[in-house]
Image: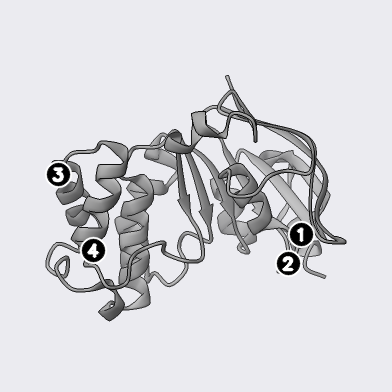
Amino acid sequence: MTALLLEGLARHFGEREALGDVSLSLGEGQTLVVFGPNGAGKSTLLRVLATLLRPHAGQVRVLGSELPQEAWAVRGRIGLLGHEPLLYRQLSARENLRFHARLHGVGETRVEELLEAVAMTERSSEPVRTLSRGMLQRVAVARAVLHDPELLLLDEPYANLDPAAVELVRPLIGATSGHTRVICSHDPSGGLAEADVVLGLRAGRVALVAAAHDVQPDAIAELYR
């Protein structure tokens, strides 16, 4: 089954083209890794796939549903981990996860399992505004996977995490997690190791799209020059 199908996707902000003529497909269970310098359109692409931005041209199909017309059908099947943790700062980690659990019809047991999985049980009653960036990222990972989404959209998912914390969250969002994934990355070697398909963006345009086994790290590095 095709999880993502983009044909001629375009998105602009006023006169500025953020994405132009982006086309690719991704199979169910596969991982797309998106590379490109700041401003290349990576985060815009994630927001379109997450149904947070409407495409201005082209076809976008996510998990079999056409966007934006059928966005309602896929929102509950997507998990988003962006630069912002999307947590209520005045609430504790547990309260945040409970809130999202209610939105998705998820039980309390799942909340406690994830707090333990990201080693946040002992700090789970503290307001998240008091937590370090690394702790916030761990709670944000738990929020993103709380409802066991079919598609994970991950923007620099290991940012702010030390090696031990990366190993904590890897079973939840890594290659063995069982999710179809789209990952934005600036790490050529690490990103390629995660990828089935590679997309390179430069100024909103496709500079590279290929199977990961056909891509060398030097080709990724060229995107940043």
Count the labels in the image.
4
User: Given this view, does label 3 or label 1 mark the residue nearer the observer?
Assistant: 3
Please tell me the numbered disc located at residue 218. 1
Q: Secondary structure at mark 2?
A: loop
- Disc 3 designates what residue? 108
Q: Is residue 146 above or below residue 60?
A: below
**What's under tag 1, amino acid-wise?**
Asp
Q: Is residue 51 left or right of residue 207?
A: left
Which is more N-terminal, label 1 or label 4?
4
Sequence-wise, which precedes: disc 2 or disc 4?
Answer: 2
Identity of the residue drawn at 26% across and 52% down:
99
Q: Nearer the viewer, residue 22 or 72?
A: 72
The mark found on residue 93 in the picture is 4
Looking at the image, residue 123 sits to the left or right of residue 62; the answer is left
Give how far across and how far down residue 170 sits, in percent: 37, 52
The N terminus lies in quadrant: top right
Instruction: Tell me which residue sits at (17%, 65%) in the image.
Output: 124
Q: CA distance from mark 4 to mark 1?
A: 41 Å
Residue at the (80%, 48%) spot, across then down: 208
SS at mark 4? helix
Q: Residue 145 in the image: state x and y as whole percent.
A: 35, 45
Kindly identify which residue carries mark 2. 37
Comparing 128 with 150, the one in front is 128
